[in-house]
Amino acid sequence: MKVTKLALAIIGGCAISMSASAGGKVDKSVSNMTGADATMLSNTCAGCHGTDGASSGPAIPSLGGMSALYITDMMNGYKSGDIKSTIMGRIAPGYSEDEIDAMANYFAGTEQHRTPQAFDKAKAAKGMKLHDKYCEKCHSESGTLAEDDSGILAGQPTPYLHYSMEDFANGDRSMPKKMKKKVKKLNKKEGSAGMEAILNYYASQK
Ligand code: HEC
Ligand code: HEC
């Protein structure tokens, strides 16, 4: 376990979302698994990631509407240990390639979720401009375009995005080279207030 604070946040989040989790409803077939199989598998993720990937936990990302490729890449990274994590490294190895594929497609077919959360208006306004300058290229349409295969930033729980940036910074997860360049430039020009403004912007997206 890495961060006690994160572990607590996760447990808190799961307690909330577990009581709220119920069956999903996508019936398309993926690889050699049926839609019912995919739904059943994906329901085991709902305790933490919420029904249809709409997270209610502060440290848990919403999976709804992410690209299947991004989800698959993350699952494979957790499975191989290339991406360090608090929880997923113990969950991902339990699934085969076909199962990961089926779940990834299931979540890709659900709606994106914007977590309702507090944000600072002035910071969010500044963050929007900084996002356009430093991040939009690969997190386009304001961090909402699944086809970029770079996750969904709009409306993700802010604590989760903080942890992601920390993981990148300390090497628990390798940061794409060109993103690293932009983040470095942002830090140089704006200090830590720059990233804070950007995260306020993502928090402001409804
Ligand atoms: C016990 C809680 C828990 C369960 C159950 C769980 N997850 Fe996670 N998931 C997390 C947490 C916490 C993270 C953030 C990484 C970490 O620290 O483990 C995460 C991250 C992820 C990510 C990365 C998303 C991103 O934005 O980069 C994917 C993909 C994912 N989980 C898929 C799944 C799938 C598929 C299942 C079901 C098989 C599942 N998870 C079950 C807690 C959980
Ligand atoms: C050159 C392309 C590029 C640029 C520029 C870029 N990113 Fe990224 N970003 C990516 C890719 C690709 C990923 C997925 C990485 C992975 O698979 O681990 C990612 C992942 C992320 C994640 C993790 C999402 C999650 O769900 O865990 C965050 C947070 C993030 N970027 C924030 C930013 C911010 C903020 C900026 C601007 C300061 C930025 N990125 C600029 C390509 C980029």
Image (cartoon, rainbow, N blue to C red):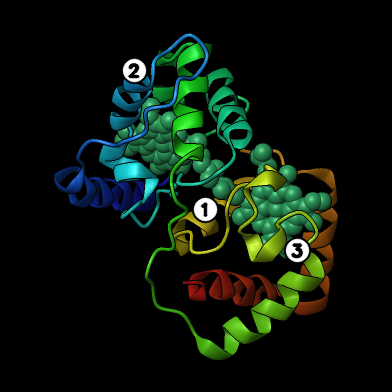
Ligand 1 under 8 Å from disc 2 Cβ: no
- The residue that disc 1 covers is 163
Nearest to the observer: residue 162 or residue 29: 29
Ligand 1 located in image quadrant: top left
Mark 2 is surrounded, within 10 Å at the Cα level, by few (under 14), some (14 to 19) or many (20 or more) other residues, namely some
Q: Is residue 52 left or right of residue 142?
A: left
Q: Position of residue 152 (x, y in %)?
A: 57, 53
Nearest to the observer: residue 106 or residue 15: 106
Q: Secondary structure at mark 3?
A: loop
Please tell me which of labels 1 and 2 falls first in the chain.
Answer: 2
The answer to whether one can see residue 171 in this image is no
Q: Position of residue 58 (x, y in %)?
A: 36, 57
Ligand 1 under 8 Å from disc 1 Cβ: yes
Residue 125 location, quadrant: bottom right
- The residue that disc 3 covers is 136
192 w.r.t. 22: above or below? below
Mark 1 is surrounded, within 10 Å at the Cα level, by few (under 14), some (14 to 19) or many (20 or more) other residues, namely some
Please tell me which of labels 1 and 3 falls first in the chain.
Answer: 3
Ligand 2 under 8 Å from disc 3 Cβ: yes
